Amino acid sequence: MSPEERSHQEAPATAPRSLAESLRTRDDASLSALLRARPDLVVPLPTDLTQLAGRAATRASVLRALERLDRFALGAAEALAVAGDPASYDELLGLMAGDGGPETDPVTAEALPHALATLREQALVWGGDDRLRLVRTARELLAPSPQHPSPTGLGPTVAEATSGMSPGRVQEILATAGLPTTPDAVSAVGALTALFTDRARMSALLTTAPAESLEVLSRLVWGPPYGQVTADPAPHLRWLLDRGLLLPTAPGTVTLPREVALHLRSGRAHRHTEPLPPVVEAAATHPPGTVDATAAGQAYTALATVAELLKDWDEGGPAVLRAGGLSVRDLKRTAVALDASEPVAAFWVELAYAAGLLASDGEPDERYAATPAYDEWLELPAAERWSRLATAWLTATRTAGLVGGRDAKDRTLSALGPGLDRSPAPEVRHRVLTLLAGLPEGASAGLDAILARLRWERPLRGDRPAADDLRARLARWTLSEAELLGVTGRGALSAHGRALLGEHPEHLPAVGPAGPGDKLPVHRQHHRPAPPEPLTAEGRAAAAAHAARLLAPLLPEPLDHVLLQADLTAVAPGPLMRPLADTLDVLADVESKGGATVYRFTPASVRRALDAGRTASDLHAFLAAHSRTPVPQPLAYLIDDVARRHGQLRVGAASAYLRCDDEALLTEILADKRAAPLRLRRLAPTVLAARTDPAALLEGLRAMGLAPAAESAEGDILIARAHAHRSPPRTPPEPVPDGPPVPDATLLTAALRAIRAGDLASTAPRKPTGSSSGEGDPPRTTAAETLATVQAAVLTGESLWIGYVNAEGSASQRVIAPIRVEGGFVTAYDHTADEVRTYPLHRITGVAELADEAT
């Protein structure tokens, strides 16, 4: 059913008298649309349509529904709030399009039925086109008052503004305005209202107004409608006050009556109605291949950065603050290690955390460490590793852009700390990417255009400036983070980025006309497409797999070789295979990163490889096998020289001792002033003792340019292997939902069935029994009366209305058709549950026959 058809669906023979009656006229498709649009109505499940209507009119639920309207639909609701109650469709059209109606504003006139259908679908408006009623709570929220000005800028009506005025003063205003006096104040207010709503008479009255008076009206006409006057107002103000064109609301304060403002506005409730959303146009266009290649390059950089971060924390990362999160100092150190700014480093840290690759270890001296899932992640192909990160980013509510800001208690928000969850984040990310996907391939959009579209779809409420709008900040962060992650390239959405949305590009909605000559119908241009159903876990996995398949051919293949240089460096012209990269990380230090990584060999790095159990021959063979160039002689000499001295000195545990077969070398060490902090003394020609622990002794000797080796109690050399510290298995942080989740089809079907059945039980006509405490209350009968009535219904096949209390003590009303009674139980077809059930007779509190019209 189209929105236009739904806008006229409420035309029963008898007009509904309440929202509940209006809901009863809806079909299942319409009720399903309501529950999808306002999922908070399902939790907990209403027992019937009356309870559903009551919940739909609560302040919290109405506020949530209003905040999810687009600018034009919200404008229509605001117009109804200042219209009569009830209002006709023509009155609403006049408030939106002005006195000229469709002739002067055809675009607004064509878009209004769709907006009204949206308000009806969400149960904010009910009634036929001749009696439109805004839900009372919505009217209270949107109607003007001195404390809460209307978004329309309109003030109170004449009747509201004169409610505290003396009858004599009202009669004086009538006389000055050229109207005859009336017998009472009510008719006087009616006469003044009739004057202000009569276009011809109002125009004639204003032609006699002084120019200064018209200037005052022009300043108040679009709001705010309130102004200040002195006890002795100027003549041009007195002219307005005497004729009721300005009415006092408090001492020294006057207001422009709503009817006068609408005349000056030519009947419009809004200065700008904005029936069409701002078109997001392409700001720049690049070849799609260039976009995909740029995004793929950044995706590879993202993988390398996350791996570098977790490798740096492999043996235990920074300590966890007492309040949770990283300290400012640790974030700065991480930024330096990643060669990135602190906000970018915070993004990578939060991304690894959202993907479940990073967590606290839970030890007494709690620190951050990689999780076991990180090791599994490393074994995946590069494209799948990227899809894991991108999917985690797209669905996470943690917002790295908030790091460094302040919370409500003026406390600094730290990376990995509490307070970073923002529920709208996933929706905004998805919406921004969808807007980019609606552009031609390779096209990027300007930030201002995207922000304008988002603000039209979810207009700001209240007096918040645009700079404080969370959705605007989320959109800015989304664009920068998508570029860092490789979802976009040069500001345009990549092919694998489109696949990540779970939609094929040809099925994505256009955000503007396809070409200069194309023009869509207004109702199709007006509304953004309905939000897609949330992807299930299977859907997200399928989208991630599709994105990985598109990205895989664009990523560089891992290499199994390097280029050795004579200056003791090795150049990796691309990404290296993991075994080669892991060994090089031990044997050499990374000097520079980029498209090609440069490693430098130093005595310390070679000694590190020897400490890890490699021998000189192992290192020579490794370099010869993985170098496309001959092994330079200086590098071979460096390895042999360090290996010749490695282990010549042996450090063991006494407090610590030092032994060496070369007595002259020990004598030289004792004489060296740099050894004084070690407090060495000779125990034997080949053994020195130290008053420090073995680790400090090793570091001290290495600082002197020596290559000592640690040994065990048995005299064997200890191999120093890196110790990978891991946290216990951790699950990724759960996103914080923005209200109840949208119910799926199964839940909607069950909910509608229960609500319909409960409504049947509560509204079915009953024969009077005299035993109910009030209309609609469950019947009360004795056990004997209950048994007799049920047995009679078995014989006649009639349905009964019963009150029932289950084993948990919950009371309910049901409509049943008894089938048999035996053993203290009644077996019946339950119309409420739409199935056959058995009920203990002692739990039936009462029974009544249904009226003939119900059967």
Image (cartoon, rainbow, N blue to C red):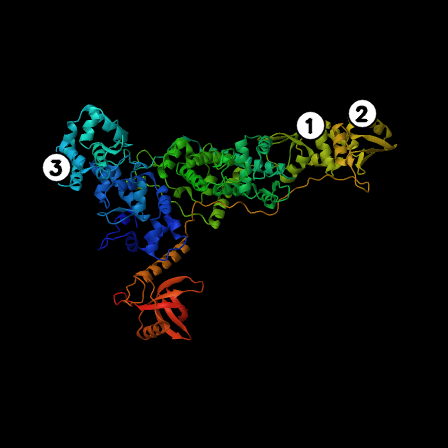
In the rendered view, does 38 fall on the left or right side of 657? Answer: left
The residue that mark 3 highlights is 181
Total numbered circles: 3
In front of the other: label 2 or label 1? 2
The residue that mark 2 highlights is 672
Q: Earlier in the sequence, mark 3 or mark 2?
A: 3
Q: Nearer the viewer, residue 499 or 248?
A: 248
Q: Earlier in the sequence, mark 1 or mark 3?
A: 3
Real-space Cα distance between discs 2 and 1?
30 Å
Real-space Cα distance between discs 1 and 3?
106 Å
Q: Residue 687's x, y, as percent? A: 85, 34
The residue that mark 1 highlights is 568
In front of the other: label 1 or label 3? 3
Density class for disc 1 (Cα within 10 Å; few <14, some 14-19, many ≥20) is: some
Density class for disc 2 (Cα within 10 Å; few <14, some 14-19, many ≥20) is: few
In front of the other: label 3 or label 2? 3
Which amino acid does the dot numbered 3 rest on? Answer: Thr
SS type, badge 1? loop
